[in-house]
Amino acid sequence: MSFFQSLAAAFKGGAQSRVPLARNFSSPWFFAEGSARGPFEYTGAVRRAYLDNPVAQRAVRLVAEGIGGAPLMPTDPALAALVRASSAGQALLETLASQLLLHGNAYVQVVKDAAGRPVELFALRPERISVIAGADGWPTAYAYKVGDRTLTIPVLDEDASPNLIHVRHFHPADDHYGAGCLSAADQAVATHNAAADWNRTLLENAARPSGALVYDPGDGAGLSADQFDRLKDELTRAYSGMTNAGRPMLLEGGLKWQSLSLSPADMDFAALKAAAARDIALAFGVPPMLLGLPGDATYANYREANRALWRLTLLPLAGKLLGALAEALGTWFPDAALAIDLDQVPALAEDRERLWAQVSAADFLSNAEKRALLGLPPAE
């Protein structure tokens, strides 16, 4: 019995009481905006990662767009139209995959017509949602807060059909909220952003001087305060910045130019940035080679890295999303299934070709058994 079936049975009074959740209601690991705040602040982390960091944004988009554009198995046309529809101008599956990666929770509101049939699946902002638990700890409703207004959405409707679908990643310290990949990548994102700010400062303000002016007075007298200020102002105005790069310098008597090079600490800082970028890719399950990160020799080529991305990241995440949607929508579509059509995924073509060759060469199998192993329907 699925979660929604057991909840509907309990709603109708036809099932035994569920086991209460051993939930600590004072848990600090709430990610929803408007509820208890934990050590991980989601809104600021999203701004630093998805809006300011190219590695994190590309990793999220690579996974989310891959799932959003993946071909689905032939199923009920109405169900396929619901899943393939856009949510606020954005593909539903792509939005849900992004929310799972960043927040760890994805919420889908089931919009119904007058007859109680679903007409739209709408992805809600996860940071605006708080779980309202019953006396036994199980969710009974969800509070969606926008500004000063709060909308309470019951888990089930009057006819015991789901109003909201909650998909979440595993969280070892919380029963109601999931943990996103961004919480694990937050420190790596901060390190990478700090390195980018350092490099920008080098370009704009010459934080690491390319050289030094050495004054060697012949009579033993140093520069006066006015001379020092005039020299510093002239260097800042005429020789610093990108527009003055490579401009020749005219030196007066007693001044000579001494070039400086990158110190070992500067070189280590560049390596630290690359390591932070690889940690970001690791947190989101994307092979670093696909993000253009140097020094990655794990995969022999992009084809193997792309296949690993599908096998290790996209397919498990898509299975979680499609399984949750199919379970909740099974009330209206009991015989329909949601799954990715592996035969239509170019990155998995070699795997499917190898499987077809192995099954075709198995003479001890009947045609019906071969079709079943390949995931094909029985022959007419």
Image (tube, rainbow, N blue to C red):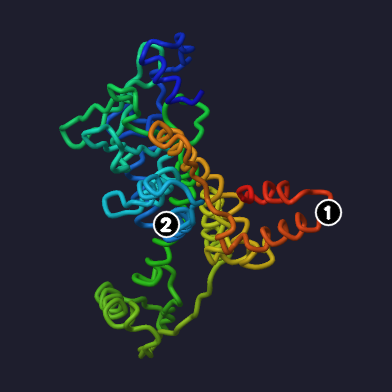
The residue indicated by pointer 1 is 363
Q: Residue furthest right?
A: 364
Q: Residue furthest left?
A: 148
Q: Amino acid at mark 2?
A: Gln
Q: Amino acid at mark 1?
A: Asp
Residue nearest the observer in this picture, 254 or 137: 137
218 sits left or right of 314 in the view: left
Disc with the residue nearer the chain's start (1 vs 2): 2
Q: Secondary structure at mark 1?
A: loop
**Quarter of the view holding residue 287:** bottom right
The count of marks equals 2
- Residue 98 picture location, percent across and down: 41, 49
Q: Residue at x 34, y 70 (%)?
A: 205
Pointers 1 and 2 in contact (CB under 8 A)?
Answer: no
Q: Is residue 26 above or below residue 298?
A: above
105 sits left or right of 279 in the view: left
The residue indicated by pointer 2 is 57
Q: Is residue 202 visible?
A: yes
Mark toward the viewer: 1 or 2:
1
Q: Residue furthest front?
A: 380
302 sits left or right of 121 in the view: right
- Residue 55 picture location, percent across and down: 46, 59
Q: Residue at x 39, y 33 (%)?
A: 166
- Residue 42 picture location, percent across and down: 36, 41
